[in-house]
Amino acid sequence: MINTVPPGFIFIIGALFIPIIKNRNLKCGYLLLLPFISFINLIHIPVGTHFTVGFLDYTLVFAKVDRLSLLFGYVFHLITVIAIIYALHVKDDLQHVAGYVYGGAALGVTFAGDLISLFVFWEMLTIGSVFLIWARRTQKSLDAGFRYALVHIVGGLILLAGILMHIHSTGSVEFTYIGLKNGNLGTYLIFFGFGINCAWPILHPWLTDAYPEATITGVIFLSAFTTKTAVYVLARAFPGTSMLIWIGALMTMFPIFYAVIENDLRRVLAYSLINQVGFMVCGIGIGTHLAINGAVSHAFNDIIFKALLFMSVGAVMYRTGKVNATDLGGLYKSMPLTCIFCIVGAASISAFPLFSGFVSKSMVMSAASMGGMSIIWFMLLFASAGVFHHAGIKIPFFAFFSHDSGIRTKEAPLNMLIAMGIAAFLCIFIGTFPEYSVYRLLPFTDVVYHPYTPTHIMAQTQLLFFSALAFTLLLLSGIYPSELRAINLDADLIYRKGSRLLVYVVTETAGAIARAADFVFIKLLPVKLAAFSKQPVSGFMSKMRPANPGAAKSSTGATLETETLLPAGVPVLIAVAFLMILAFVFLKVI
Amino acid sequence: MEREKEHLFDKPRNVKRLLTIFYGFLAFLLIGDFFIHKHTEFAWEEWPEFYAIYGFVACVALVLAAKYLLRPIVKRREDYYD
């Protein structure tokens, strides 16, 4: 029997040793070994609640192991291996450390059995991920990283407030089903705290703003962890919350319009990430066993095929230094393998039969149709056609085909090809043999789903191929929107321009207040008070009579009279009277 | 100077071939639809060629909406936030 440690600890503690290892080969070996050690550790932790620690009056649980958390645990290990192979050529320790801390935090959240440790790991997610953005070391990535951090810090605080209110009202820190409760603000705050990480509509722009600014290899980690841990916690705490159905359906819809007109291919993928998470959120909202199975298996598949797409676009970016559709094209000539891997990822995200998206997305669709949700079903179907359009066709077409940009470069480095190859193999294997792969890991074993029925295959193939026909005809007729060097406003306008407006308003308002305060408290009042305290009555009286020819003018302009001082008791009398009036008013108020 | 090797889609003939295969497959899908016994939840899923028409219309609507409605509202210069 192996002595185990809480899942995630090996990543987090192991990350700290990365900078110490100086030998390059040793470092590569160590980087590759960590996920395997962590995985062996994970599979030796039996199902149940383990690693409980007393903290104040509460019990912290570092390993709540069940089928739901295990599915996410497995795929987080899998993607860490793939992302690390993809990043092996990177000599920047910061990225490796951040990647592992980030992955460890995601595992920490996944296996947290209590809300306190969940919150700690939740915050660690932000720390790990923001360094993967900053590690690109450009002004843009620095700015985007700060915006990203600010949004997540606010989200974290909302979550913390919710958790504290929840603990106060229930007396328990256990992380289990929470559900929205009327009149209980805490549950709503937790819900929205999770929602920020899940990139709900309007709360989403941190994702499309920051991910395209991250490093080529860092974005693979980013695409996997933050949104999928949010999906996990929603599946754990808010399954069957009907609000999620609509939130999810909106998430599948709105990003595809943006993706069609977006020029930066990694930003197109960021929009399609939101679109895919929408299917998961919708499934969690529907809440039936089939829907939850669909949501989490789609999370599993999405982590792999989205990483594959980001990796292939990243490889193009690595070799050409360009990522805008306007600058690329014709790369199938010099990067044929990357092109094939990209097409596999595109087929998977589009849910072509025999590719992974097909076997999981259709579960959510079926759950919606079984529930008789016709509007939701139409929205999801629209999004299914749309995702093929922007991620399935647009990404490979504009990068590898389209007009020849004239760029001739080398194929991607070997480590990148291996990472993409593993991901592409998994996409096809899971899509072809779901019952031997992801279907075995699903949280609910009481529902059986068969994706490969003639009706379903025909329906999906028709949908996709006629979407492709639309693309072809629009492109040939010149109606398809040409790629432009431009940016598209999104909800981040609120804080990107709003912050400037805020700064302007605050500085102008504060400036006006400061000027007024300066005039009243520095220039006016002290002089008046000085004059008043010297001659409370005669000073006032002196205003009433003609100026004393013997009085000297002070530099401040107040009249200084020295002859007629009042008895000392008079100011005291006035002060006492003033206090009595105050006391009277105060008592009246009470 | 060495001339670059001609690639697959440099020849217009190959592009044409690909399109022909593509259109042929579409025709196959349209015809095949009538030979499949459908098990569906919603009544409209049984309408002939429902998915083909929906996929085509959805994508045309998507592109037109993105180009003529969304882009004029949200498009800004690349240095808009700088």
Image: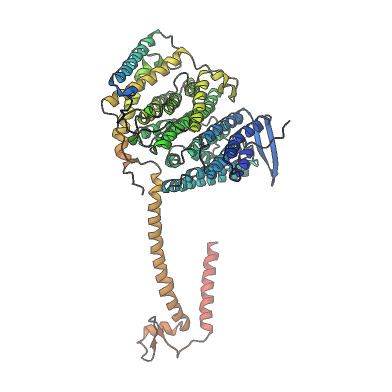
Q: Is residue A489 visible?
A: yes
- Considering only vertical position in the picture, is A318 above or below A138? above
Numbered label tally: 0
Q: Quadrant of the C terminus of chain A?
A: bottom right
- Left or right of A306? Residue A78 is right
Question: Quadrant location of residue B2?
Answer: top left
- Left or right of A429? Residue B28 is left
Q: Position of residue A263 (x, y in %)?
A: 35, 36
Q: Position of residue A156 (x, y in %)?
A: 54, 45
Residue at the extreme left: A477
> Which of the pair A286/A398 is nearer the observer?
A398
Residue at the extreme front: B1
> Which of the pair A534/A477 is nearer the observer?
A477
- Considering only vertical position in the picture, is A288 above or below A217? above
Q: Quadrant of the N terminus of chain A?
A: top right
- Left or right of A17? Residue A291 is left
Residue occupying the point 68% across, 30% down: A44
Q: Position of residue A507 (x, y in %)?
A: 40, 59
Q: Position of residue A311 (x, y in %)?
A: 46, 33
> Which of the pair A253/A85 is nearer the observer?
A85
> Which of the pair A221/A590 is nearer the observer?
A221
Residue occupying the point 37% across, 60% down: A508
Question: Quadrant location of residue A238?
Answer: top right
Q: Is residue A183 visible?
A: no
Display coloring: rainbow
Residue at the extreme top: B35
- Left or right of A433? Residue A58 is right
